Image (cartoon, grey):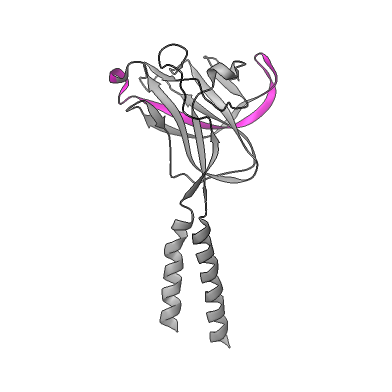
Amino acid sequence: MKTALTALTLALAAALPVAAQAQTTVFNTGTPVGPVVGNSIGIDPQDWIAESFTLTQATTISSIMAYVASSQPSTDIGQTYTIALYGSRSSKAGLVPNYSGPASQLDAFSQTYEVDGWSGPSGLSLNLAAGSYFVAVEADANDGVLNLVVPNGVSTLPSAVAQYNGGNSYVADPAIASDAFGLRVTAAVPEPSSLALLLAGLGLTAVIVRRRRG
């Protein structure tokens, strides 16, 4: 009996990581179709951009991806930039009343440019409460970024976009339709089959323990 109980416990422990491997999309603008050269927003030490996403309930975020490109890829390969996560604040700023923009920074992830496309941290376990958040693409003087951009032309627009153009903080960007960039946020959820296996296993463990005590 002890051997069977040990084997069951080990099997349940092995199944725990599997239960969180499934992913669900929290927010996805779609891949931008705007040109790399032209209407894209440039990213450098004086020019950053952020856009919002909203959680309707407490969520464990597993990845945050932005679509980043370069007008001169051979020059920018190996250069670094940052994808940052901010909380939201409501105030009046820029040209938009009741502006909801980035507040305190919650986390930041250094990225290295290699090729145009989706880039960002994955394998995360960020526990966020329900509410609005901003994801920003940033660079500072130490990054050496020269020609990085975030193309526009997304199919799903965020509720808010903000820009940093030097100074002390982000300001509202009223041109949401033209300046929104590619953003994809995912969360980890248990796979139904794995969750059912875990529940069944826990129930069987309880029965075994009860019988041994009896």
Q: Residue furthest left?
A: 74
Q: Is residue 169 visible?
A: no
Report the magenta residues as a range.
Answer: 74-99
Image location of residue 136, percent across then percent down:
51, 27
Image location of residue 142, percent across then percent down:
38, 22
Query: Magenta-highlighted stretch: main secondary structure?
Result: strand
* Residue under the point 45% across and 78% down: 5
Side of 95 relative to 36 (left or right):
right
Number of marks in picture: 0
Q: Is residue 32 above or below residue 207?
A: above
Quarter of the image for residue 164 reads top right
Residue 63 or residue 35, whichever sits in front: 35
Q: Is residue 27 above or below residue 136?
A: below
Image location of residue 110, percent across then percent down:
41, 32
Image location of residue 192, percent across then percent down:
53, 58
Q: Is residue 81 magenta?
A: yes
